[in-house]
Image (spheres, helix red, strand yellow):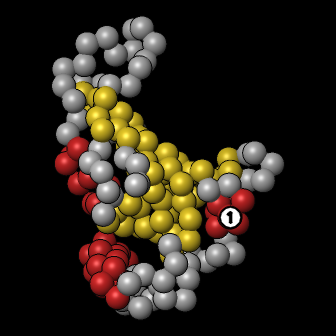
Amino acid sequence: MQPAKITRPKFPKGYVDKPVSFVDWDWVAAQLEESKHYWLCSVYPNGKPHVVPRWGVFLDGKVYYDGSPETRHALNIKRNPAVSVHLESGSQPIILYGISSPAGKPSSELGKRLSAAYKKKYKEMGYAPVSNSFYGGGLFVCTRHVGTTWISLIEALFKFLVDEE
């Protein structure tokens, strides 16, 4: 995967006239890795948005999350894979736009890494999938991110783009 291309987003005059710095990609990646809750927005067939909280993990620059292929978000992305993924913070938001799809059966190595990441975040909440838990389906991945974030009331901001080759 290519490293994130970081640029300043364009805002209307008066929103952010003189930001003091860029947000570092390592900070963004750490927030995505540590977040226990993600908000996933998909689109109903009639064009209305559908937003749902998801547990997931951020590995290799991708957001992995699981759920039944029969859930509303899974049915939505089957028809339209365009999604946005947000973290919970309103003062330090990270907003990703990408393509979500079934991840398929992960390799043994990826299954182990996914299991370890999920257990680190959710074991205390009673969720601890094993490395082959995702072999039967129900694992989704969000890739090709374009995103925006800002911290400390627009002290620093950036827009980033990550495209899969």
Q: Relative to the observer, which residue lies in front, 4 or 14?
A: 4
Rate crowding at label 1 as few (under 14), some (14 to 19) or many (20 or more) other CA atoms within 10 Å: some
The image shows residue 78, relative to residue 44, as above or below, that is below
Q: Which residue is mark 1?
A: 78
134 vs 161, nearest the viewer = 161
User: Which residue, as the protein is rendered here, is positioned at the far top?
Assistant: 13
Q: Regarding mark 1 in the picture, which secondary structure is present there?
A: helix
Image quadrant in which you'd find residue 15? top left
Say if residue 72 shows up in the picture: no
Count of residue discs? 1
Query: Does residue 61 appear in this view?
Result: yes
Residue placed at 68% from the left, 47% from the top?
49
Work out whether residue 148 or residue 3 is closer to the camera in this orientation and state it.
3
Q: Residue at x 43, y 18 (%)?
A: 11
In the rendered image, the vertical position of residue 137 relative to residue 43, given as above or below? below
Residue extending farthest right: 46
User: Looking at the rendering, in which quadrant would you find the N terminus?
Assistant: bottom left
Q: Is residue 60 left or right of residue 52?
A: left
Is 94 on the left-hand or right-hand side of 71?
left
Q: Residue at x 36, y 33 (%)?
A: 159
Q: What's the residue type where badge 1 is placed?
A: Lys
Q: Is residue 133 above or below residue 50?
A: below
Q: In the rendered view, does 85 fall on the left or right side of 117?
A: right
What residue is at 25 percent from the left and 13 percent from the top? 18
Residue 135 % position (x, y): 49, 88
Residue 19 drawn at (x, y percent) = 25, 19
Residue 78: percent from the left, percent from the top? 68, 64
